[in-house]
Image (spheres, rainbow, N blue to C red):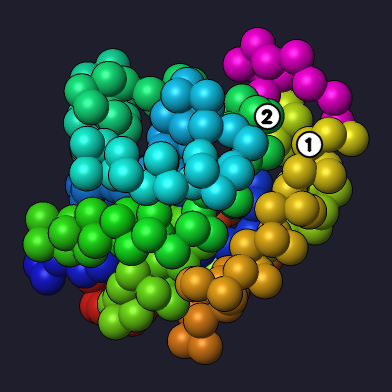
Amino acid sequence: MRKIVIAIDGYASTGKSSIAKLLSSHLNYIYVNSGSMYRAITFHAISKELIPLTKKNINTLISLLSDIQLDYRINNSTGFYDIYLNNTNLESKLKSLEVSNHVSSIAEIPQIRKHVVKIQKSFQHKGGLVMDGRDIGSVVFPNADLKLFLTASDDVRAKRRYDELINEGYEINYEDIFNNIISRDKKDSKRKDSPLIIPKDAVVIDNSKMNIIDQLNFIIKLIKTKFNF
């Protein structure tokens, strides 16, 4: 069976990572959460006290890129891939509101995007691949075999993110989460380098009223129809 590349883009908190993980597991494909790369670099910038992003701090962060190694390793407990920065597992440390509040600013720095996109493109040679993010179908893999774009109402997205963080022990309030996802979408859509857009050949999925199994079944049916799997 031919291995394909599946690009999943979408607005903040539409469940891109959740469905991408489930789909990759179903297909026995490699899964890469591209957004976690930008979050890992954001976490690194915070730990190095390079926030706020002054011109000096940005230049310092750019100078550190050659020493930042990002890779994914299988988590034997979950069966999914976790992100590592310089051999340290950061998977559980990247969802904080502090990281979320700064990740869009980090991601719009051209040198950082170029560094991350180069890493992302390298995964194409590893066989079947599911990658989710904000510019996968438009920039990283413009020739992906299948492009999906997820959307949902603002309230639904904020509630999903809020519930997820509460369940993981974070102390946050709903208004902060709501404002954050709206701000991130606006910032990412207006950035000059690789803006968040809906690729013309993407299948748009509004999952406001769909649970994750509904989404998985829809996508599997789509793949079977399109590729005769």
Other residues around mark 2 within 10 Å, as few (<14) / some (14–19) / many (≥20): some
130 or 100: which is nearer to us?
Answer: 100
Which segment is the magenta one?
165-174
Indicate yes or no whether the magenta region holds residue 66: no
Q: Which mark is residue 197?
A: none
Q: Main secondary structure of the magenta part?
A: loop
Q: Give the left or right position of residue 7, taking residue 42 as reference.
A: left
As drawn, the residue found furthest toward the top would be 169
Quarter of the picture containing the C terminus is bottom left
Q: Position of residue 152 (x, y in %)?
A: 73, 59
Q: Which mark is residue 177?
A: 1
Rendering quarter of residue 103: top right
Q: Position of residue 79 (x, y in %)?
A: 27, 28
Mark 1 falls on what kind of element? helix
Q: Which mark is residue 97?
A: 2
Instruction: Say what amino acid the circle numbered 2 marks.
Output: Leu
